[in-house]
C-alpha cells in the first residue's frame, strides 16, 4: 500500500483515534494514521492487516500519503498540543486543505484557529465527538460546526460512522464557526450534572437505605428499564457487579472517592455566567468534584463538624427507591433544560442559528448523555422551535409538577440524615425560583444602593433612583 493515496488522515492514535479510524475503514474509507508515540503507532499497525489503513511516524510521509485536497483529522488533547500540531502541519499543507479538530477544544480556541488558518487559505472545523472508545469504534454522536462547504466534503463519512437511531445518523451541521465545539461543551456540562445526580442517589441508597452492591445493581437495572432509561443509568447498574481482579471484592468499593475533571464542565459554568444563564446543577457538579478532591480536608473537618446521629436506617427503603426514581427524572429534566437554555442564549449571541431539535436528535444515540427522555424533550422543540427553556413547554412542565413531591421528600431525607445532595437541592431550587412571581432581589437592590450608591429601579414608575439611607455611624 506504499503508493496508495488515502482519503483521510488521522493524527492521534490513542484509544479514540484508533477506534475511529477502524470505524471509518469498516465503512469503506481509507485512512492514514500518524502518531509520534511509538507504542501507540505499533498498536495501531497491528490492527491494519488486510485493511486500507497505514500508520506513519514521519509527518512528511503521512501528509504525502493523502489525497488532495487533503482532509486531516486531529484527536489529540485540547489546548497547546492542538496549536503545536497545527504549526507543524501548516508548512506541509496547501490551499483548500481541511483540518478537523475532533477533540474537546474550547470553542474560543476553535474560533481563533479558524480565523488564523483562513488567512493561509486553509480550512478548519471543530467537531465534537461523544461516546467514548465504544462510541468511536461502533458509532458516536458527532457535533460539527463550520462552513457548509467544508461539511459537505466530509458529511458522507461522518454520517456513515455516526450512531444511528431509527436509521437516522446522529450527526448534523450545527452551525457556523465553533458551534460544534460549543454544543459539545454544553453536552459535557450536562454530563457533569447527570453524573453528580446519580452519585448523590447512590449515596442516599447506600448510607440511608443501606443497600449492598447487588441491591444497588437491581435498583439501577430496574430504573434503566423505565423512564430513566439512559446510558449513564445502564452503566451504573453494571458498575456495582464488577469484580476487582486484585482483591476479589467489588471494584466500586476499591475506587478512591476523588473525581477528576478535564475542564469542560467548568467551561460550561463560566460561559453560562458570562451569558447570565443559570445552570445551578452543572455549577454544583463542578464544585462537588473539587470538594471530592480535598480528601485530607474532609477527613480533618469530619473530626470537628458533627451531623445527625449516624447509624440511622430508613424503615422502608423501597419507598426511598421509588421516590428517588421520580426525583432523578425531575432533576435530569431540569439539567437538560439548563443546558438547552444556555445553547439558546449562545446561538442568539454568537449567531450560530443552532436548531435545538437537531441537537436533541443527534444526542439520542452514541453520546454519553443519551436517554429515552430526550424524545420528550425533542417534542418540546417540535412544538416550539424558539422555546427558550423546556420548562416553559406545557406538557413537560406538567411532568415536573407531578414529580415535585418526590424530589421534595428526597431532599428532606438528605437533610434529616445529613447526606450531601446539593445537585438535587439545586434542581429543586431552580424549579422553585423559576416559578416564583416574586423574589427577594429588591432587598439586594436596596443593599447595593445603601453601601455603594448603585441605584435601584422601582415597581411603580420608570427610571433609576438613589436614596440617602439612614446610616448609623458611630
Image (tube, rainbow, N blue to C red):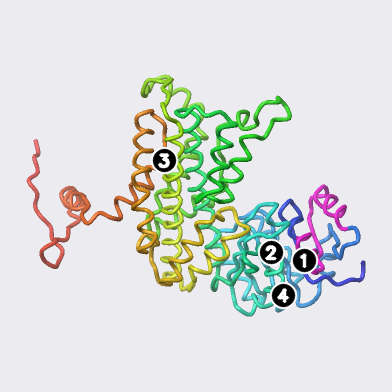
- Quarter of image, res 83: bottom right
Q: Callout 3: 10 Å neighbours few (<14), some, many (20+)?
A: some
Which circle, 4 or 2, is nearer the viewer?
Answer: 4
Label 4 close to label 1 by CB (< 8 Å): no
| Residue linked to disc 2 | 86
Q: Callout 2: 10 Å neighbours few (<14), some, many (20+)?
A: some
- Left of 392 or right of it: where is 109? right
Looking at the rendering, in which quadrant would you find the C terminus? top left
Residue 472 versus residue 257: which sits nearer the camera? 257
| Residue linked to disc 4 | 97
Label 1 close to label 2 by CB (< 8 Å): no
Q: Please tell me whether residue 241 is drawn above or below residue 26 in the rendered image.
A: above
Distance (Cα) linking label 3 and label 2: 52 Å
Magenta run includes residue 27? yes
Label 4 sits on a secondary structure element that is: loop
Q: Please tell me whether residue 348 is drawn above or below residue 213 in the rendered image.
A: below
**Which tag, 3 or 1, sits closer to the chain's start?**
1
Stretch of the chain drawn in magenta:
21-48
**Which tag, 4 or 2, sits closer to the chain's start?**
2
Which circle, 4 or 1, is nearer the viewer?
Answer: 1
Distance (Cα) linking label 4 and label 3: 55 Å
- Tell me what residue is drawn at x 41 percent, y 31 percent: 419
**Which tag, 1 or 2, sits closer to the chain's start?**
1
Distance (Cα) linking label 3 and label 1: 51 Å
**Which tag, 4 or 3, sits closer to the chain's start?**
4
Label 4 close to label 2 by CB (< 8 Å): no
Looking at the rendering, in which quadrant would you find the N terminus? bottom right
Q: Residue 254, percent across and down?
A: 63, 28
| Residue linked to disc 1 | 9
Label 3 close to label 1 by CB (< 8 Å): no
On residue 323, the disc is 3
- Left of 357 or right of it: where is 76? right
Amino acid at each position: 500500500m506504499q503508493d496508495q493515496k488515502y482519503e483521510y488522515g488521522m493524527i492521534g492514535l490513542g484509544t479514540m483515534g484508533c477506534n475511529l479510524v477502524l470505524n471509518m475503514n469498516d465503512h469503506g474509507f481509507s485512512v492514514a494514521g500518524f502518531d509520534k508515540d511509538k507504542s501507540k503507532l505499533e498498536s495501531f499497525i497491528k490492527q491494519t492487516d488486510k485493511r486500507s489503513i497505514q500508520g506513519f511516524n514521519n509527518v512528511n510521509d503521512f501528509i504525502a500519503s493523502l489525497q488532495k485536497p487533503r482532509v486531516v483529522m486531529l484527536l489529540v488533547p485540547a489546548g497547546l498540543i492542538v496549536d503545536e500540531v497545527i504549526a507543524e502541519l501548516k508548512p506541509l499543507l496547501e490551499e483548500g486543505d481541511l483540518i478537523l479538530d475532533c477533540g474537546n477544544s474550547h470553542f474560543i480556541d476553535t474560533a481563533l484557529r479558524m480565523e488564523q488558518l483562513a488567512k493561509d487559505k486553509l480550512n478548519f472545523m471543530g467537531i465534537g465527538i461523544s461516546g467514548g472508545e465504544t462510541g468511536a469504534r461502533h458509532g458516536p454522536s458527532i457535533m460539527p460546526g463550520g462552513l457548509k462547504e467544508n461539511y459537505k466534503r466530509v458529511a458522507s463519512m461522518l454520517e456513515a460512522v455516526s450512531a444511528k437511531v431509527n436509521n437516522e445518523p446522529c450527526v448534523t451541521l450545527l452551525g457556523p464557526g465553533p458551534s460544534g465545539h460549543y454544543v459539545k461543551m454544553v453536552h459535557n456540562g450536562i454530563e457533569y450534572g447527570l453524573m453528580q445526580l446519580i452519585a448523590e442517589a447512590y449515596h442516599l441508597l447506600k448510607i440511608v437505605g443501606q443497600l449492598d452492591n447487588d441491591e444497588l445493581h437491581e435498583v439501577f437495572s430496574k430504573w434503566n428499564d423505565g423512564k430513566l432509561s439512559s446510558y449513564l443509568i445502564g452503566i451504573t447498574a453494571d458498575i456495582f457487579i464488577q469484580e476487582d481482579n486484585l482483591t476479589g471484592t467489588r471494584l466500586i468499593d476499591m475506587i478512591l472517592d476523588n473525581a477528576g475533571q478535564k475542564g469542560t464542565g467548568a467551561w460550561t459554568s463560566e460561559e453560562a455566567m458570562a451569558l447570565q444563564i443559570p445552570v445551578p446543577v452543572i455549577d454544583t457538579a463542578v464544585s462537588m468534584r473539587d470538594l471530592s478532591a480535598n480528601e485530607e480536608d474532609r477527613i480533618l473537618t469530619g473530626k470537628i463538624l458533627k451531623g445527625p446521629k449516624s447509624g440511622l436506617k430508613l424503615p422502608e427503603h423501597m419507598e426511598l427507591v421509588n421516590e428517588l426514581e421520580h426525583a432523578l427524572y425531575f432533576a435530569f429534566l431540569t439539567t437538560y433544560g439548563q443546558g438547552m437554555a444556555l445553547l439558546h442564549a449562545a446561538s442568539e449571541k454568537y449567531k450560530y442559528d443552532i436548531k435545538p431539535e437537531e441537537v436533541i436528535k443527534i444526542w439520542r444515540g452514541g453520546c454519553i448523555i443519551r436517554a429515552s427522555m430526550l424524545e420528550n424533550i425533542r417534542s418540546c422543540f417540535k412544538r416550539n422551535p424558539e422555546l427558550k427553556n423546556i420548562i416553559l413547554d406545557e406538557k413537560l412542565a406538567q411532568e415536573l409538577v407531578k414529580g415535585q413531591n418526590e424530589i421534595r421528600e428526597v431532599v428532606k431525607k438528605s437533610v434529616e440524615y445529613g447526606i450531601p445532595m446539593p445537585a438535587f437541592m439545586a434542581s429543586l431550587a431552580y424549579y422553585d425560583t423559576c416559578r416564583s412571581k416574586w423574589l427577594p432581589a429588591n432587598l439586594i437592590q436596596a443593599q447595593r444602593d445603601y453601601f455603594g450608591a448603585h441605584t435601584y429601579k422601582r415597581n411603580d414608575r420608570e427610571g433609576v433612583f438613589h436614596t440617602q439611607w439612614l446610616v448609623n455611624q458611630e
